[in-house]
Amino acid sequence: SNDMLISLSMNFNNDGASQDELVSNLHRNGILKTESVIDAMKKTDRKDFVNPKHGPLYEDKPRNIGCEATITSPHMHAIALEALFSEDETESESTSRREKPFIGLDIGCGSGYLTVCMGHILASDDSKIYGIDHARELIELSRNNTAKSHQSFLDSGRVAYYEGDGFLGLPEKGPFDFIHVGAAVEEIPEELVNQLTPGGALVIPVGPQGGEQKLVKLTKLSSSSASSDVRKEEIMTVVFSRMNDEPPKSEKEKAQGIAEEMRELYKEGKEITEALQHWQATFKTEHGRKPSAGDMAKDTRIKGLLTRFKDLQREIQKTENTFSKARQEEEKEAA
Protein backbone atom coordinates (compact mmCIF):
# COMPACT_ATOMS: atom_id res chain seq x y z
CA SER A 1 0.00 0.00 0.00
CA ASN A 2 1.03 3.66 -0.31
CA ASP A 3 1.29 3.85 3.47
CA MET A 4 4.30 1.56 3.14
CA LEU A 5 6.19 4.48 1.65
CA ILE A 6 6.55 6.13 5.02
CA SER A 7 7.93 2.96 6.60
CA LEU A 8 10.25 2.45 3.65
CA SER A 9 11.62 5.95 4.07
CA MET A 10 12.12 5.39 7.80
CA ASN A 11 13.58 1.89 7.67
CA PHE A 12 16.09 2.48 4.87
CA ASN A 13 19.02 4.84 4.88
CA ASN A 14 18.50 7.23 1.97
CA ASP A 15 21.43 9.52 2.88
CA GLY A 16 24.07 10.10 0.26
CA ALA A 17 27.39 11.83 -0.28
CA SER A 18 26.05 13.61 -3.36
CA GLN A 19 22.74 14.44 -5.02
CA ASP A 20 23.12 11.51 -7.41
CA GLU A 21 23.74 9.08 -4.56
CA LEU A 22 20.82 10.47 -2.54
CA VAL A 23 18.45 10.08 -5.50
CA SER A 24 19.82 6.63 -6.32
CA ASN A 25 19.15 5.51 -2.74
CA LEU A 26 15.59 6.86 -2.88
CA HIS A 27 15.14 4.92 -6.13
CA ARG A 28 16.71 1.73 -4.80
CA ASN A 29 14.55 1.86 -1.69
CA GLY A 30 11.36 2.06 -3.74
CA ILE A 31 10.41 5.67 -2.98
CA LEU A 32 11.31 7.06 -6.39
CA LYS A 33 9.89 5.21 -9.39
CA THR A 34 9.03 7.66 -12.15
CA GLU A 35 11.82 8.45 -14.63
CA SER A 36 10.93 12.12 -15.07
CA VAL A 37 10.86 12.62 -11.28
CA ILE A 38 14.18 10.80 -10.82
CA ASP A 39 15.75 12.92 -13.56
CA ALA A 40 14.34 16.14 -12.08
CA MET A 41 15.67 15.41 -8.58
CA LYS A 42 19.10 14.56 -9.97
CA LYS A 43 19.19 17.89 -11.79
CA THR A 44 18.04 19.86 -8.74
CA ASP A 45 20.97 19.70 -6.34
CA ARG A 46 19.98 20.08 -2.69
CA LYS A 47 23.20 21.97 -1.96
CA ASP A 48 21.68 25.01 -3.69
CA PHE A 49 18.72 25.01 -1.31
CA VAL A 50 20.06 24.21 2.18
CA ASN A 51 22.58 25.86 4.46
CA PRO A 52 25.54 23.51 5.14
CA LYS A 53 25.82 25.00 8.64
CA HIS A 54 22.59 23.19 9.52
CA GLY A 55 23.94 19.70 8.80
CA PRO A 56 25.12 17.38 6.00
CA LEU A 57 23.70 18.46 2.65
CA TYR A 58 22.44 15.08 1.50
CA GLU A 59 20.91 13.69 4.67
CA ASP A 60 17.31 12.57 4.31
CA LYS A 61 16.14 15.08 6.92
CA PRO A 62 14.32 18.42 6.91
CA ARG A 63 16.41 21.55 7.40
CA ASN A 64 15.62 24.99 8.80
CA ILE A 65 15.51 27.73 6.16
CA GLY A 66 14.43 30.63 8.38
CA CYS A 67 11.07 32.36 8.90
CA GLU A 68 9.99 29.43 11.06
CA ALA A 69 10.02 27.25 7.91
CA THR A 70 11.90 24.17 6.75
CA ILE A 71 12.88 22.51 3.52
CA THR A 72 11.28 19.11 3.79
CA SER A 73 13.24 15.86 3.74
CA PRO A 74 14.20 14.47 0.31
CA HIS A 75 11.97 11.40 0.67
CA MET A 76 8.93 13.66 1.16
CA HIS A 77 9.88 15.65 -1.93
CA ALA A 78 10.10 12.36 -3.78
CA ILE A 79 6.72 11.15 -2.49
CA ALA A 80 4.98 14.44 -3.33
CA LEU A 81 6.40 14.50 -6.86
CA GLU A 82 5.53 10.85 -7.40
CA ALA A 83 1.97 11.50 -6.22
CA LEU A 84 1.66 14.51 -8.51
CA PHE A 85 3.23 13.06 -11.63
CA SER A 86 2.16 9.41 -11.28
CA GLU A 87 3.99 6.23 -10.45
CA ASP A 88 2.53 4.78 -13.66
CA GLU A 89 3.86 7.39 -16.07
CA THR A 90 3.91 6.15 -19.63
CA GLU A 91 6.57 7.08 -22.15
CA SER A 92 4.01 9.17 -24.07
CA GLU A 93 3.09 11.09 -20.87
CA SER A 94 6.74 11.79 -20.15
CA THR A 95 7.26 12.97 -23.74
CA SER A 96 4.10 15.12 -23.53
CA ARG A 97 5.45 16.94 -20.47
CA ARG A 98 8.60 17.79 -22.43
CA GLU A 99 6.69 19.02 -25.49
CA LYS A 100 3.26 20.27 -24.36
CA PRO A 101 3.01 23.45 -22.27
CA PHE A 102 1.68 22.95 -18.75
CA ILE A 103 1.12 25.33 -15.86
CA GLY A 104 2.10 24.30 -12.33
CA LEU A 105 1.76 25.92 -8.92
CA ASP A 106 3.86 25.19 -5.82
CA ILE A 107 2.16 26.61 -2.72
CA GLY A 108 4.48 27.12 0.24
CA CYS A 109 7.50 27.07 -2.05
CA GLY A 110 9.89 27.77 0.86
CA SER A 111 13.39 27.23 -0.48
CA GLY A 112 12.23 26.81 -4.10
CA TYR A 113 13.43 23.19 -4.35
CA LEU A 114 10.23 21.49 -5.45
CA THR A 115 9.33 24.42 -7.72
CA VAL A 116 12.55 23.88 -9.66
CA CYS A 117 11.92 20.12 -9.80
CA MET A 118 8.55 20.86 -11.39
CA GLY A 119 10.38 23.10 -13.86
CA HIS A 120 12.41 20.10 -15.00
CA ILE A 121 9.44 17.73 -15.21
CA LEU A 122 7.24 20.19 -17.12
CA ALA A 123 10.04 20.82 -19.55
CA SER A 124 8.28 22.42 -22.53
CA ASP A 125 9.66 25.85 -23.36
CA ASP A 126 6.18 27.30 -22.87
CA SER A 127 5.48 25.62 -19.50
CA LYS A 128 5.19 27.90 -16.48
CA ILE A 129 5.71 26.96 -12.83
CA TYR A 130 4.81 29.45 -10.13
CA GLY A 131 5.96 29.30 -6.52
CA ILE A 132 3.99 31.18 -3.89
CA ASP A 133 4.74 31.80 -0.22
CA HIS A 134 3.39 34.13 2.43
CA ALA A 135 6.83 35.29 3.61
CA ARG A 136 8.71 37.80 1.49
CA GLU A 137 12.02 36.55 2.83
CA LEU A 138 11.24 33.04 1.56
CA ILE A 139 10.34 34.35 -1.88
CA GLU A 140 13.71 36.12 -2.00
CA LEU A 141 15.38 32.92 -0.78
CA SER A 142 13.65 30.86 -3.50
CA ARG A 143 14.77 33.27 -6.21
CA ASN A 144 18.34 33.35 -4.93
CA ASN A 145 18.52 29.56 -4.62
CA THR A 146 17.08 29.08 -8.10
CA ALA A 147 19.57 31.53 -9.58
CA LYS A 148 22.53 29.46 -8.36
CA SER A 149 22.15 26.74 -11.02
CA HIS A 150 18.87 27.55 -12.78
CA GLN A 151 19.14 31.20 -13.74
CA SER A 152 17.78 30.27 -17.16
CA PHE A 153 14.50 29.20 -15.52
CA LEU A 154 14.11 32.70 -14.10
CA ASP A 155 15.26 34.51 -17.25
CA SER A 156 12.85 32.58 -19.48
CA GLY A 157 9.94 32.84 -17.07
CA ARG A 158 9.68 29.07 -16.78
CA VAL A 159 9.82 29.55 -12.99
CA ALA A 160 8.55 32.62 -11.15
CA TYR A 161 7.87 33.36 -7.49
CA TYR A 162 5.14 35.40 -5.85
CA GLU A 163 4.37 36.54 -2.33
CA GLY A 164 0.78 35.76 -1.38
CA ASP A 165 -1.82 33.78 0.53
CA GLY A 166 -1.58 30.11 -0.39
CA PHE A 167 -5.22 29.51 0.60
CA LEU A 168 -6.21 31.67 -2.37
CA GLY A 169 -3.86 30.10 -4.89
CA LEU A 170 -2.78 32.31 -7.79
CA PRO A 171 -5.92 32.70 -9.93
CA GLU A 172 -4.43 35.34 -12.23
CA LYS A 173 -1.90 32.76 -13.49
CA GLY A 174 -4.23 29.75 -13.66
CA PRO A 175 -5.89 27.48 -14.36
CA PHE A 176 -3.25 24.95 -13.35
CA ASP A 177 -2.52 21.44 -14.56
CA PHE A 178 -0.66 20.60 -11.37
CA ILE A 179 -0.82 22.13 -7.88
CA HIS A 180 1.40 21.06 -4.98
CA VAL A 181 0.81 22.31 -1.43
CA GLY A 182 3.62 21.97 1.09
CA ALA A 183 1.65 22.65 4.30
CA ALA A 184 -1.38 21.05 5.91
CA VAL A 185 -4.97 22.31 5.79
CA GLU A 186 -7.93 21.03 7.79
CA GLU A 187 -10.20 21.43 4.79
CA ILE A 188 -9.18 21.63 1.14
CA PRO A 189 -9.70 25.22 -0.07
CA GLU A 190 -12.32 25.34 -2.84
CA GLU A 191 -10.31 28.10 -4.49
CA LEU A 192 -7.52 25.63 -5.25
CA VAL A 193 -9.84 23.00 -6.72
CA ASN A 194 -11.52 25.69 -8.85
CA GLN A 195 -8.12 26.70 -10.22
CA LEU A 196 -7.43 23.22 -11.63
CA THR A 197 -7.86 22.49 -15.32
CA PRO A 198 -10.07 19.52 -16.24
CA GLY A 199 -7.77 16.55 -15.63
CA GLY A 200 -5.60 18.68 -13.35
CA ALA A 201 -4.16 17.27 -10.12
CA LEU A 202 -3.77 18.74 -6.64
CA VAL A 203 -1.57 17.11 -3.99
CA ILE A 204 -2.09 18.47 -0.48
CA PRO A 205 -1.68 17.33 3.18
CA VAL A 206 -5.07 17.34 4.91
CA GLY A 207 -5.68 17.14 8.65
CA PRO A 208 -5.36 19.10 11.90
CA GLN A 209 -2.08 20.31 13.37
CA GLY A 210 -0.87 17.57 15.73
CA GLY A 211 -3.59 15.16 14.57
CA GLU A 212 -3.85 12.56 11.84
CA GLN A 213 -3.00 13.97 8.44
CA LYS A 214 -3.21 12.37 5.02
CA LEU A 215 -1.43 13.29 1.82
CA VAL A 216 -4.34 13.59 -0.58
CA LYS A 217 -4.42 13.70 -4.37
CA LEU A 218 -7.42 15.33 -6.04
CA THR A 219 -7.98 14.98 -9.77
CA LYS A 220 -10.50 17.27 -11.40
CA LEU A 221 -12.57 15.23 -13.85
CA SER A 222 -14.38 18.07 -15.65
CA SER A 223 -14.79 21.84 -15.71
CA SER A 224 -17.68 21.54 -13.23
CA SER A 225 -17.16 22.75 -9.66
CA ALA A 226 -19.34 19.91 -8.30
CA SER A 227 -17.61 17.70 -5.74
CA SER A 228 -18.78 14.63 -7.68
CA ASP A 229 -16.51 15.70 -10.54
CA VAL A 230 -13.39 15.38 -8.37
CA ARG A 231 -11.62 12.09 -7.70
CA LYS A 232 -10.00 11.90 -4.27
CA GLU A 233 -7.19 9.50 -3.34
CA GLU A 234 -5.44 9.21 0.02
CA ILE A 235 -1.76 8.58 -0.65
CA MET A 236 -0.32 8.07 2.84
CA THR A 237 -0.20 9.31 6.43
CA VAL A 238 2.00 12.38 6.89
CA VAL A 239 3.00 15.04 9.41
CA PHE A 240 3.12 18.63 8.14
CA SER A 241 3.02 22.09 9.68
CA ARG A 242 -0.22 23.94 9.02
CA MET A 243 -0.60 26.38 6.19
CA ASN A 244 -0.21 29.96 7.38
CA ASP A 245 -1.52 33.07 5.65
CA GLU A 246 0.31 35.52 7.89
CA PRO A 247 3.97 36.26 7.26
CA PRO A 248 6.05 34.75 10.06
CA LYS A 249 8.67 36.85 11.73
CA SER A 250 12.08 36.46 10.19
CA GLU A 251 15.13 36.21 12.43
CA LYS A 252 15.85 39.82 11.54
CA GLU A 253 12.37 40.89 12.63
CA LYS A 254 12.71 38.92 15.86
CA ALA A 255 16.01 40.66 16.60
CA GLN A 256 14.41 44.04 15.86
CA GLY A 257 11.58 43.26 18.28
CA ILE A 258 14.02 42.33 21.03
CA ALA A 259 16.05 45.48 20.33
CA GLU A 260 12.90 47.56 20.75
CA GLU A 261 12.20 45.80 24.06
CA MET A 262 15.74 46.62 25.19
CA ARG A 263 15.28 50.27 24.29
CA GLU A 264 12.16 50.41 26.48
CA LEU A 265 14.04 48.81 29.38
CA TYR A 266 16.95 51.24 29.01
CA LYS A 267 14.48 54.13 28.88
CA GLU A 268 12.83 53.01 32.10
CA GLY A 269 16.24 52.55 33.74
CA LYS A 270 17.23 56.08 32.76
CA GLU A 271 13.97 57.49 34.19
CA ILE A 272 14.51 55.67 37.52
CA THR A 273 18.12 56.87 37.71
CA GLU A 274 17.07 60.48 37.10
CA ALA A 275 14.32 60.20 39.73
CA LEU A 276 16.80 58.83 42.32
CA GLN A 277 19.35 61.53 41.51
CA HIS A 278 16.70 64.24 41.87
CA TRP A 279 15.57 62.83 45.24
CA GLN A 280 19.18 62.63 46.47
CA ALA A 281 19.84 66.27 45.47
CA THR A 282 16.64 67.45 47.18
CA PHE A 283 17.49 65.46 50.36
CA LYS A 284 20.99 66.97 50.48
CA THR A 285 19.58 70.50 50.10
CA GLU A 286 17.06 69.92 52.87
CA HIS A 287 19.33 68.02 55.31
CA GLY A 288 22.80 69.27 54.45
CA ARG A 289 24.11 65.75 53.83
CA LYS A 290 23.85 62.83 51.45
CA PRO A 291 21.06 60.31 52.18
CA SER A 292 22.09 57.04 53.80
CA ALA A 293 20.77 53.59 52.94
CA GLY A 294 18.52 53.90 56.00
CA ASP A 295 17.09 57.18 54.71
CA MET A 296 16.28 55.53 51.39
CA ALA A 297 14.66 52.55 53.10
CA LYS A 298 12.36 54.87 55.09
CA ASP A 299 11.04 56.52 51.91
CA THR A 300 8.42 54.16 50.44
CA ARG A 301 8.63 55.64 46.94
CA ILE A 302 12.43 55.50 46.81
CA LYS A 303 12.45 52.01 48.24
CA GLY A 304 10.08 50.93 45.44
CA LEU A 305 12.24 52.60 42.79
CA LEU A 306 15.35 50.82 44.07
CA THR A 307 13.59 47.46 44.04
CA ARG A 308 12.37 48.04 40.48
CA PHE A 309 15.86 49.15 39.42
CA LYS A 310 17.38 45.87 40.65
CA ASP A 311 14.69 43.88 38.82
CA LEU A 312 15.27 45.98 35.74
CA GLN A 313 18.99 45.19 35.75
CA ARG A 314 18.18 41.46 35.70
CA GLU A 315 15.65 41.94 32.88
CA ILE A 316 18.17 43.94 30.84
CA GLN A 317 20.84 41.26 31.28
CA LYS A 318 18.40 38.54 30.21
CA THR A 319 17.17 40.54 27.22
CA GLU A 320 20.72 41.36 26.12
CA ASN A 321 21.54 37.63 26.12
CA THR A 322 18.39 36.90 24.11
CA PHE A 323 19.28 39.67 21.67
CA SER A 324 22.77 38.26 21.22
CA LYS A 325 21.32 34.84 20.33
CA ALA A 326 18.79 36.44 17.98
CA ARG A 327 21.57 38.26 16.14
CA GLN A 328 23.44 34.97 15.73
CA GLU A 329 20.30 33.39 14.22
CA GLU A 330 19.86 36.43 11.97
CA GLU A 331 23.44 36.01 10.69
CA LYS A 332 22.79 32.29 10.04
CA GLU A 333 19.62 33.14 8.14
CA ALA A 334 21.42 35.76 6.07
CA ALA A 335 24.22 33.29 5.28
Image: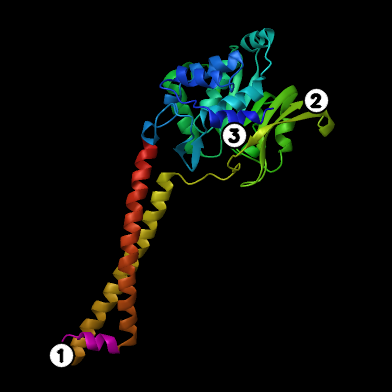
Q: Earlier in the sequence, mark 3 or mark 1?
A: 3
Q: Nearer the viewer, residue 302 or 237?
A: 237
Residue at the (26%, 85%) spot, across then down: 296
In this view, the mark in front (3 or 1): 3
Quadrant of the rendered structure where residue 160 is?
Answer: top right
Disc marking residue 223: 2
Tags 1 and 2 in contact by the CB under 8 Å rule?
no
- Magenta stretch, residue numbers: 289-298
Determine whether 91 is above or below 71 in the image.
above
Q: Position of residue 132 (x, y in %)?
A: 57, 32
Q: Of helix, strand and loop, which one carries label 1?
A: loop
- From the image, tell me which residue sits under label 3: 182
Point out which mark residue 288 bears. 1
At label 3, counting other C-alpha atoms closer than 10 Å, the crowd grade (few under 14, some 14-19, many 20 or more) is many
Q: Quadrant of residue 8?
A: top right
Mark 3–mark 2 Cα distance, whole angstroms, equals: 25 Å
Judge left or right: residue 163 versus residue 274. Answer: right
Query: Seen from this angle, which residue lies furthest bottom?
Result: 287
